[in-house]
Image (cartoon, rainbow, N blue to C red):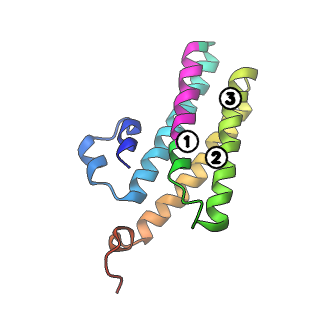
Amino acid sequence: MGENQHFAGSYTEEYVNNATPVQLIVILYDTAIRSCEDARGCMERNDVSGLNQAIDKCNSVISELQASLNLKDGGEIASSLNNLYDYMKANMLRAGAEQNFDLIAEVYRLLENLRSAWRRIDSDVKPDILTGGDQK
């Protein structure tokens, strides 16, 4: 997930380089959520250029999350997440076109819920399970 470092935002390079795969996913969610917050702020200030940049960044991060899905082996969960990511990206684009706070808020809530789930996974999963080590 080397490309994820591009989206790390305020995370230190050392933290990102030493993060587990689950922690990298959480970093991506954090970055997408910050982009939603930026988009909302730009919308409030009528900063169209900033709004478009924030929407593009959010959608790029969501696309990175989407690209990390294993659609072949991930079953229904991966397929559902893929569809949800498409829905979120479409909503962000519509939010910009329609100047609609509610659409940004909806994407924000979805991202927060997913981030919360991944944080729970991070606290429950043993590192060797993620790296392919022996499970005892």
Which image quarter is the C terminus in? bottom left
Residue 134 coordinates in the image, percent (x, y): 32, 81
Residue 50 falls inside the magenta stretch: yes
- Crowding around mark 2 (Cα neighbors within 10 Å: few <14, some 14 to 19, many 20+) is many
Q: Residue at x 76, y 22 (%)?
A: 98
122 vs 115, left or right, is left
What is the magenta segment's predominant secondary structure? helix
- Label drawn at residue 63: 1
Report which quarter residue 75 is drawn in.
bottom right
Q: Residue at x 68, y 29 (%)?
A: 93
Going by the numbered disc 3, the residue's amino acid type is Leu
Considering depth in this image, is 68 or 22 the residue closer to the camera? Answer: 68
Label 1, label 3: how many angstroms apart (C-alpha)? 13 Å
Q: Secondary structure at mark 3?
A: helix
Q: Is residue 97 above or below residue 116?
A: above
Query: Which circle's residue, 3 or 2, is located before the other in the chain?
Result: 2
Residue 90 coordinates in the image, percent (x, y): 70, 35
Q: How many marks?
A: 3
Q: Which residue is mark 3?
A: 93
Q: Secondary structure at mark 2?
A: helix
Q: Is residue 78 above or below residue 49?
A: below
Q: Which residue is mark 2?
A: 85
Report which quarter residue 9 is drawn in.
top left
Query: Which circle's residue, 1 or 2, is located before the other in the chain?
Result: 1
10 vs 60, left or right, is left
Badge 1 vs badge 2, beta-carbon distance below 8 Å: yes
Going by the numbered disc 1, the residue's amino acid type is Ser
Q: Residue at x 26, y 41 (%)?
A: 13
Going by the numbered disc 2, the residue's amino acid type is Tyr
Q: Secondary structure at mark 1?
A: helix
Query: Which circle's residue, 1 or 3, is located before the other in the chain?
Result: 1
